[in-house]
Image (spheres, helix red, strand yellow):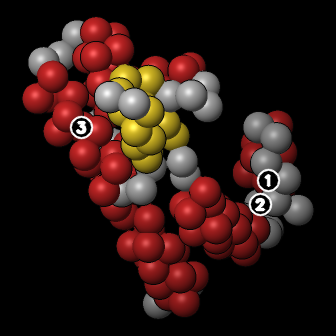
Amino acid sequence: MKYQDEYMTIYEDFKANSKFFQAIGNETRQGILLFLIASGEKGARVNEITENAHLSRPAVSHHLNVLKDAGIIHCRPEGTSHYYYISIKQHLPHLYKLNHDVGAFLREYYKDDEAELEKFDKMGIPLK
């Protein structure tokens, strides 16, 4: 099969990132992440997240645990409060590798198709 090696490389990259993708694949968790991003480096307390998400505290706790287990957020205790904040540093090398490998595949796949290469170029994705 043509491109079998490239497909397998991308497959392995996706497997390496699957927990990350599963965690961010939920619309509620995406909303929580956007709220945490807007909260800045300090992060946000569960009560603030609950109020913003319009969910029960147990529901928010569940989503926070999924994001924590995936390593996307961390919790910092401060007195009697706990602040949740974004921390994806450990995912960046894996995501970069996935991006790089998909780019390499697309360059090879479209190397003889100027019209397709032009479309990518217009989107700010140079494949040449």
> For the residue labelled by badge 2, is the local secondary structure a helix, a strand or a loop?
loop
Q: Nearer the viewer, mark 3 or mark 1?
A: 3
Observer-side mark, 3 or 2, equals 3
| Quadrant of the image occupied by residue 16 | bottom left
Quickly name the residue at label 1: 117
Amino acid type of disc 1?
Leu
Say above or below: 12 vs 77.
Answer: below
Viewport quadrant of the C terminus: bottom right
* CA gap, disc 1 and disc 2: 6 Å
Q: Quadrant of residue 37?
A: top right
Q: Residue at x 76, y 37 (%)?
A: 123
Asked if the residues shown at circle 1 and circle 2 are in contact, with their CB atoms under 8 angstroms apart, the answer is yes
Three-letter amino acid code at the position of disc 3: His
Q: How many marks?
A: 3
User: Which sits earlier in the primary sequence, circle 3 or circle 2?
Assistant: 3
Q: Which dot marks residue 63? A: 3
- Disc 2 target residue: 113
- Say which element carries label 3: helix
